[in-house]
Image (cartoon, grey):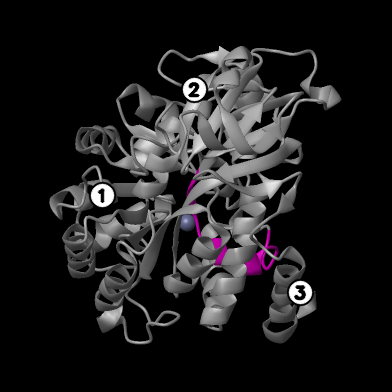
């Protein structure tokens, strides 16, 4: 690569995106209308007003006339393979949904199912302008394989729970299994960040939580966990551990800036202070919380106290889709986030909170070229507004036309370039026919 870089003439780039309204979300909040983005070796080599594009020549171009060019969206929390369970059980509160329907379905999971379910999720996310996601599940090596083949940026947490689980029949080996996953995937690809995902403080013992965090620390890996999703969970943890869940994680030494706390609906003010002080990320999944009637996380209050917030979809089975544009809009509708905060929580703010790196989430020279191009031609996008507001509140996933991750065009004119979508659809429908009765779905 270095040799190749030396041989290049100045101004020669791999991809030149021209003609669109470029929303950078950089520190100066620059908008170039029209503007350009030049991409070399996966990073942004130049960005600015359209006339300045003349100093670049490119092997490949993307005409973004009539479109918005903006940072790709980040899905801060999902269980990708749960696309297989989309619509499996609906209109139920969380504990009934989980224990009577999802856990029994997960007992049938195979590595092959996780691979195809994850690939389906990645296809869905790319089509919706999502260029990076954080995931937690079982057989996570299969999710990593799917993400790597598709070329999306991903943080992937091997599941840890104190019950027999898919691929981990002996819960005594749950942390060891997660260590094996970290060992296998650390340093394999610059786009893949392996992690550990502990299910909840009530399904993992204190010993499991502490050992899992130690394993994550040994690999400088993120630690992901659902926290305070229901009032029931808080009562359970209080009863069995003598502490509220946020306080428990603090005492166990788990709260730090590499820890992701998903949901955080039932935190008390002291727990919010602890989380803000530790720099842990809170992932807000408003649509999943509404579907499972779990409640509303007070992320506006958390943000005001300095908590780092990212938006997430959670799994497709509790949502029903993987659509961060919709989560942005829902978070605003619930009056928890302003449109500016929602946009940050889906882009640069999410990248910083989740640890995707300081060079992800904005369109700026030197940053990773993770971006989307969205058509601005739909009547519901008229009249033209501030493009930041359009991105935060009005865009829908059907507007997304092209998606670039690390300089590679993964979606061009709404067509996947790395995923054989007909094959993926055929495989997931075969899995449904083989493992789940149609009537049940
Ligand atoms: Zn979840």
The residue shown at (43%, 50%) is 229
- Residue at 20% over, 65% down: 215
Q: How far from the left and from the top, in percent, is residue 323?
A: 63, 45
Locate residue 113, reporting x and y percent: 59, 77
Ligand 1 closer than 8 Å to the CB at disc 1? Answer: no
Name the residue beneath numbered marker 1.
244
* Left or right of 91 in this view: 376: right
Q: Which residues are magenta?
A: 75-90
Q: Where is 111 relative to 75, above or below?
A: below
> Counting other residues with Cα less than 10 Å from the Cα at mark 3, is it few (<14), some (14-19), or many (20 or more)?
few
Residue 404 or 264: which is nearer the viewer? 404
Q: Does any portion of residue 441 appear in the rendered image?
A: no
Decide which of 33, 288 is in the foreground and name it: 33
On screen, residue 30 above or below 208: above
Q: Which mark identifies residue 426?
A: 3
**Labelled pair 2, 1 in contact (Cβ < 8 Å):** no
325 and 6: which one is in front? 6
Report if the beta carbon of the residue with label 2 is closer than 8 angstroms to ligand 1. no
Q: Which residue is mark 2?
A: 25
Q: Residue furthest right?
A: 379
Q: How many marks?
A: 3
- Which mark's residue is nearer the viewer, 1 or 3? 3
The residue depicted at 71 percent of the width and 76 percent of the height is: 427
Mark closest to the chain's N terminus, 1 or 3: 1
């Amino acid at each position: 690569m270095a040799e190749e870089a030396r041989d290049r003439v100045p101004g020669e780039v791999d991809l030149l995106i021209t003609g669109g309204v470029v929303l950078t979300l950089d520190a100066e909040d620059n908008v170039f209308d029209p503007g350009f983005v030049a991409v070399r070796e996966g990073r942004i080599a130049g960005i600015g007003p359209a006339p300045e594009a003349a100093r670049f020549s490119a092997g490949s171009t993307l005409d973004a006339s009539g479109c918005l060019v903006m940072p790709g969206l980040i899905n801060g929390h999902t269980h990708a393979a749960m696309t297989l369970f989309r619509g499996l059980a609906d209109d139920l509160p969380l504990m009934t949904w989980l224990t009577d329907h999802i856990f029994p379905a997960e007992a049938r999971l195979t590595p092959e199912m996780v691979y195809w379910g994850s690939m389906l999720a990645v296809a869905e996310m790319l089509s919706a302008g999502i260029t990076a996601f954080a995931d937690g599940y079982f057989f996570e090596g299969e999710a990593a394989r799917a993400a790597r083949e598709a070329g999306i940026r991903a943080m992937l947490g091997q599941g840890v729970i104190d019950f027999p689980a898919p691929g981990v029949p002996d819960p005594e080996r749950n942390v060891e299994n997660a260590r094996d996953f970290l060992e296998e995937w650390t340093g394999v690809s610059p786009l893949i960040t392996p992690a550990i995902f502990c299910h909840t403080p009530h399904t993992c013992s204190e010993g499991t939580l502490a050992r899992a965090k130690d394993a994550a620390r040994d690999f400088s890996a993120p630690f992901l966990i659902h926290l305070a999703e229901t009032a029931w969970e808080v009562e359970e943890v209080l009863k069995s551990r003598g502490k509220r869940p946020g306080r428990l994680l603090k005492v166990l030494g788990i709260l730090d800036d590499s820890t992701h706390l998903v949901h955080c609906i039932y935190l008390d003010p002291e727990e919010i202070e602890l989380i803000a002080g530790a720099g842990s990320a809170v992932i807000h999944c408003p649509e999943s919380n509404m579907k499972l009637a779990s409640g509303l996380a007070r992320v506006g209050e958390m943000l005001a106290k300095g908590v780092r917030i990212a938006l997430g979809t959670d799994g497709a089975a509790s949502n029903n889709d993987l659509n961060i544009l919709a989560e942005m809009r829902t978070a605003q509708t619930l009056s928890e986030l302003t449109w500016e905060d929602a946009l940050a929580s889906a882009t640069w703010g999410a990248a910083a909170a989740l640890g995707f790196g300081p060079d992800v989430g904005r369109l700026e020279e030197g940053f990773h070229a993770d971006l989307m191009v969205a058509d601005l031609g739909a009547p519901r996008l008229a009249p033209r507004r501030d493009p930041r507001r359009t991105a935060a509140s009005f865009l829908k996933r059907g507007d997304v036309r092209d998606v670039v991750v690390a300089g590679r065009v993964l979606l061009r004119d709404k067509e996947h370039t790395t995923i054989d979508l007909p094959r993926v659809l055929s495989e997931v429908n075969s899995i449904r026919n083989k493992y789940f009765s149609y009537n049940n779905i």
